[in-house]
Image (tube, rainbow, N blue to C red):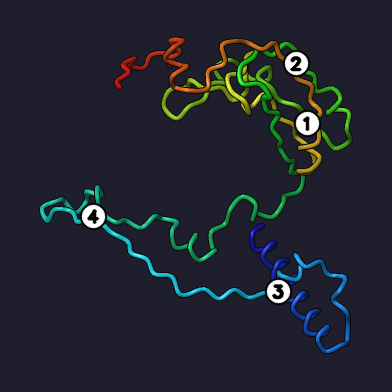
Amino acid sequence: AYRRALVVSLFFKAFLSITQKLSKAGIVSADALPPEERSGADSFHTPALKSSQLFERVCTDQPIFDPIGRPKVHAAALKQATGEAIYTDDIPRMDGEVYLAFVLSTKPRAKITKLDASEALALGGVHQFFSYKDLTEHENEVGPVFHDEHVFAAGEVHCYGQIVGAIAADNKALAQRAARMVKVEYEELSPVIVTIEQAIEHGSYFPDYPRFVTK
């Protein structure tokens, strides 16, 4: 996606440059180009940048298999630095592939009282709507160590932007449009806690974690 955008931007810059040269020669007029777009043909010359990178020196008696403190090169560093790394957006689309767009919470803390995707599902090319109702309680629990997070909000949202559901559709634009059409009604809850100080004031701590607060 980045490379495609780069090609378009370079083509546009070349177009602006050629247009201005032809304008100076009296062949065409560049008056139709807004000033902010004409500036796209300008070349900027900056002095060469200098930088320093510091690495920690490990003790001479540190075992060779101990990586702590050593400047190890990331496994994908060379491919990422040279543009050879392949990301999800670089992979060609497959036959039958669908796009997923999330329905996100618009409230920082609230109870979900209604979740209606019927209008979105009525659009041609929209295949399915997913929510916590499509998963068992165990399947809806995720987390790197402790499974204390939800794939989809289960009846209550705890932050703005929490995933409430997902729409699967034929293309990205359609999926995003359908996701915006899903009707979610809330019953707002209080208190809304957004700072550490408010969490301490209301005794809001993660369960099963140490509750020592040191200033």
Contact, mark 1 vs mark 3 (Cβ under 8 Å): no
Q: Are marks 2 and 4 in contact (CB under 8 Å)?
A: no
**Mark 2 → mark 4, Cα distance in angstroms:** 54 Å
**With 124 as the anchor, is 66 left or right in this view?**
left
Front position in the image: 170 or 81: 81
Q: Earlier in the sequence, mark 1 or mark 4?
A: 4
- Compute the Cα span from label 1 to label 3: 38 Å
| Left or right of 71, for residue 99 | right
Mark 3 secondary-structure assignment: helix
Residue drawn 63% across the image and 28% down it: 161
Write down the quadrant of residue 108 in the picture.
top right
Query: From what the image shows, is residue 19 above or below residue 155?
Result: below
Give the residue at mark 1: 180
Q: Nearer the viewer, residue 89 or 155?
A: 155
Return the residue at label 3: 41
Label 3 Cα neighbours within 10 Å, binned few <14 / some 14-19 / many ≥20:
some
Q: Is residue 76 above or below residue 44?
A: above
- What's the mark number on residue 14? none
Q: Earlier in the sequence, mark 2 or mark 3?
A: 3
Q: Which comes before the other along the chain, label 2 or label 4?
A: 4
- Report the residue at 73% width, 40% height from top: 99
Tell me the residue that label 2 is attached to: 185
Q: SS at mark 2?
A: strand
- Residue at mark 4: 56
For this view, does 7 lie left or right of residue 125? left
Please name the amino acid that badge 4 sits on.
Glu
Amino acid identity at mark 3: Ala
Which of the 4 quarters of the picture holds residue 57?
bottom left
